[in-house]
């Protein structure tokens, strides 16, 4: 929303602040070995869930990374072409995508609640994260942010979502299963960030966080058959109407 506001109301100075939000997580929460992002980072290094040396939590949580990756894809499209932050966010997106597909389950095409421990006791394929990654990968390919090779990762995931998570009742109602209801750290009662905490949290069907991601992913996958139409073609447009201006909500004169 912040990036869209900055774009619509011509506030280019805001993009440096937006870029900084992504860079802070990139700097502090990314694991250099896997490329994955830890769920959280404590600047004081004092929380019981935090590594006392780095401040990072201990777990790579699927939906946490899903939100981050969706935010990257949705935000980049509002950046001015020559803003230096745009290139930085594209680099982060490409590093993130590379790490995410590395932990994509080869059999189902989906992702686990704890991303890097597919065979650990109690771990399971989680719906909201799988939908988020599908959406982010598909949209990034469509917009040219990621190479077309990632198309196959999105397609495998989408097929897995329909096979593993969507259940159709006799009356035609569709249910999205296997979405973790809530994950957090700290608080009362204290959430300690242990592996057991992440895999024992309640799981629900038709949770809004899963449904929202499912709708976004479905919309992107429906666009698959059309995304390459017109690639490489040249279109000539009449510039008369496009050169006309009107006042926006802030009173600035902008093109239609």
Image (cartoon, helix red, strand yellow):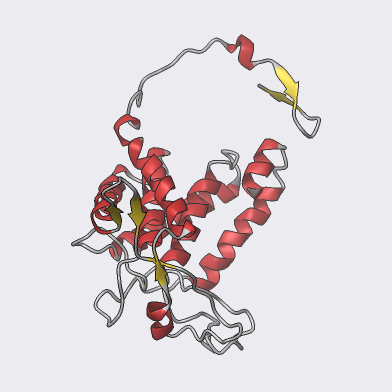
Tell me which residue sits at (45%, 82%) in the image. 58
Q: Is residue 35 left or right of residue 189?
A: left
- Residue lying furthest front: 171
Task: Judge whether 91 appears above or below 41 on screen.
Answer: above
Looking at this rendering, what residue extends furthest in the right direction? 251
Q: How many marks?
A: 0
Q: Classify the position of the C terminus by image quarter.
A: top right
- Residue 24 or residue 182, whichever sits in front: 182
In-front residue for pair 53/161: 161
- Where is residue 237? Give x, y as percent: 51, 13
State the residue at coordinates (57%, 86%).
189
Up-down relation of residue 11 to residue 191 (above or below)? above
Quadrant assignment, res 206: bottom left
Query: Residue 193's spot in the image, x, y percent?
Result: 48, 83
Q: Position of residue 30 (x, y in %)?
A: 46, 70
Side of 80 where 145 appears, left or right? left
Q: Is the residue 119 above or below the residue 239 in the image? A: below
Question: x%, y% of residue 251?
Answer: 81, 30
In the image, what residue occupies the spot 44% across and 64% down?
A: 63
84, 214: nearer the viewer? 214
């Amino acid at each position: 929303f912040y990036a869209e506001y900055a774009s619509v109301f011509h506030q280019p100075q805001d993009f440096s602040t937006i870029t900084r939000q992504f860079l802070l997580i990139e700097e502090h929460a990314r694991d250099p070995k896997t490329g994955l992002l830890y769920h959280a980072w404590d600047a004081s290094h004092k929380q019981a869930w935090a590594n006392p040396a780095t401040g990072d939590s201990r777990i790579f949580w699927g939906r946490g990374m899903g939100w981050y990756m969706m935010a990257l894809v949705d935000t980049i499209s509002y950046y001015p072409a020559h803003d230096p932050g745009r290139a930085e966010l594209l680099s982060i997106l490409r590093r993130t995508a590379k790490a995410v597909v590395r932990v994509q389950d080869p059999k189902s095409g989906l992702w686990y609640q704890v991303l890097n421990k597919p065979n650990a006791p109690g771990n399971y394929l989680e719906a909201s994260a799988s939908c988020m990654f599908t959406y982010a990968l598909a949209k990034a390919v469509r917009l040219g942010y990621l190479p077309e090779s990632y198309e196959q990762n999105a397609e495998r995931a989408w097929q897995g979502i329909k096979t593993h998570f969507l259940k159709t009742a006799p009356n035609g109602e569709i249910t999205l299963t296997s979405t973790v209801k809530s994950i957090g750290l700290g608080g009362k009662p204290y959430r300690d960030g242990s592996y057991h905490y992440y895999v024992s949290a309640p799981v629900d069907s038709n949770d809004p966080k899963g449904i929202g991601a499912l709708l976004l992913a479905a919309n992107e996958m429906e666009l698959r058959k059309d995304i390459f139409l017109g690639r490489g073609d040249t279109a000539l447009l009449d510039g008369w109407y496009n050169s006309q201006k009107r006042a926006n909500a802030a009173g600035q004169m902008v093109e239609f």
